[in-house]
Image: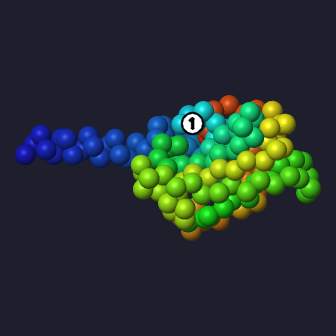
Amino acid sequence: MKSKLTTGLVVLGLALAGCGKKAGPDADHAGHGAAHHEHAAPHGGTLVEVGEHQFNLEFLHDPAAGKLTLWVLDAHAENFVRIPMRTIQVIAGDGAVGQTVSLAAVANPATGETVGDTSQFEGTAPWLQDAKTAPVRLPSIEIRGVAFRDVEVTLGVAGPASDHDHDERAK
């Protein structure tokens, strides 16, 4: 009985530790203090955190194919998060005028994801072939009932990690 209690307390302690949040006055998991940590992009793309440690979006730009792929991921960029959207619009360029690409939902029979219940979206456009780096904006996305607006990223520039010591990117 004593070993079960000890095991239970150890498991509870690990669960409460979360994703490496440090205890103490200098710790601040939201990225407003000295402590921070990073998550790797599972596909080698560019991660953008949306919400305060709620979700990540991974953008993968393939200039040779003129393709842009987007995955919706959890706060640690470890698990896919399915959303009901069928398409997601992405606008490239600075300012209000830019080129648009429509990212269509991708079904995956291996994972059971379907159009309307998937975490992956992709689209192609000629301008994606020309651009080695491109500032893009995702006007809106809804993830698990929470709407995020004007998510911005520069494709081909940011590293393949989400750093929790940065400014909020979604409004």
Give the image quarter of residue 129: top right
Give coordinates of residue 111: x percent, y percent.
42, 51
Q: Dividing the image into 4 quarters, which one contains the C terminus?
A: bottom right
Q: Is residue 81 above or below residue 4?
A: below
* Amino acid type, callout 1: His
Q: Is residue 1 above or below residue 39?
A: below
Q: Is residue 58 above or below residue 50?
A: above
- Horizontal arrangement in the rendering, residue 136 relative to residue 119 (left or right): right
One can see residue 90 in this view: yes
Give coordinates of residue 58: x percent, y percent.
62, 44
- Horizontal arrangement in the rendering, residue 21 relative to residue 103 (left or right): left
Numbered disc 1: secondary structure: loop
Between 17 and 152, which is closer to the camera in this rendering? 152
The residue shown at (48%, 52%) is: 108
The residue shown at (92%, 56%) is: 97
Crowd around label 1: few <14 · some 14–19 · many ≥20 (10 Å): few
The residue shown at (34%, 41%) is: 14
The residue shown at (69%, 59%) is: 88
- Horizontal arrangement in the rendering, residue 130 relative to residue 119 (left or right): right
Give the image quarter of residue 63: top right
- Horizontal arrangement in the rendering, residue 166 relative to residue 100 (left or right): left
One can see residue 36 in this view: no
Between 90 and 140, which is closer to the camera in this rendering? 90
Between 38 and 78, which is closer to the camera in this rendering? 78
User: Mark 1 = which residue?
Assistant: 43
